[in-house]
Amino acid sequence: MWGHMSGYGWGGMGVGMLLFWGLLIVGVVMLVKCSMGSGSCGKRKQEKSALDILKERYARGEIRREEFDQMKRDLKS
């Protein structure tokens, strides 16, 4: 019965195991890199500048025009 496993049988199983564990390890490493934000797994959000945040607050009506102008001047100086 086991005599028929010569050739591709045991050698194929060894290669298959190496591929399995190799892919598993690579997958775990990629998952960890993506979750930490240090990999290239998708697009990262670009950081907003202070002026962008100020414009958003003004657009939402959180601050008045005078406050917006004053804060904008403060940011540019």
Image (cartoon, rainbow, N blue to C red):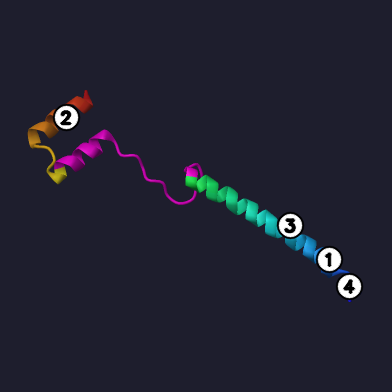
Magenta highlight range: 36-58
Q: Which numbered disc, 3 or 2, marks the residue that appears first in the sequence?
A: 3
Callout 2: few (<14), some (14-19), or many (20+) C-alpha neighbours within 10 Å? some
For residue 51, the mark is: none
- State how far apart marks 1 and 4 are (Cα): 10 Å
Q: How crowded is mark 4: few (under 14 residues within 10 Å), some or many (20 or more)?
A: few
Q: What element carries label 3?
A: helix
SS for callout 1? helix
Q: Could you tell me which secondary element the residue under label 4 belongs to?
A: helix
Say whether disc 1 or disc 2 marks the residue closer to the N-terminus.
Answer: 1
Q: Name the disc covering residue 71, or none.
A: 2
Of circles 3 and 2, the one toward us is: 3
Dot 3 or dot 4: first in sequence order is 4
In the rendered image, residue 71, in percent from the top left (x then y), is placed at 16, 29
* Residue 59 quadrant: top left
The tag on residue 2 is 4
Residue to which mark 3 is pinned: 18
Q: Residue at x 83, y 64 (%)?
A: 11
Q: Which residue is drawn at 49% across and 43% down?
A: 36
Instruction: Compare residues 51 and 60 and report the one nearer the observer.
Output: 60
Q: Split into 4 quadrants, where in the image is the N terminus?
A: bottom right
Can you say which quadrant of the picture contains the C terminus?
top left
What residue type is disc 1 on? Trp
Q: Where is residue 64 in the image (x, y as percent from the top left)?
A: 9, 37
Q: Mark 1 points at which residue?
A: 10
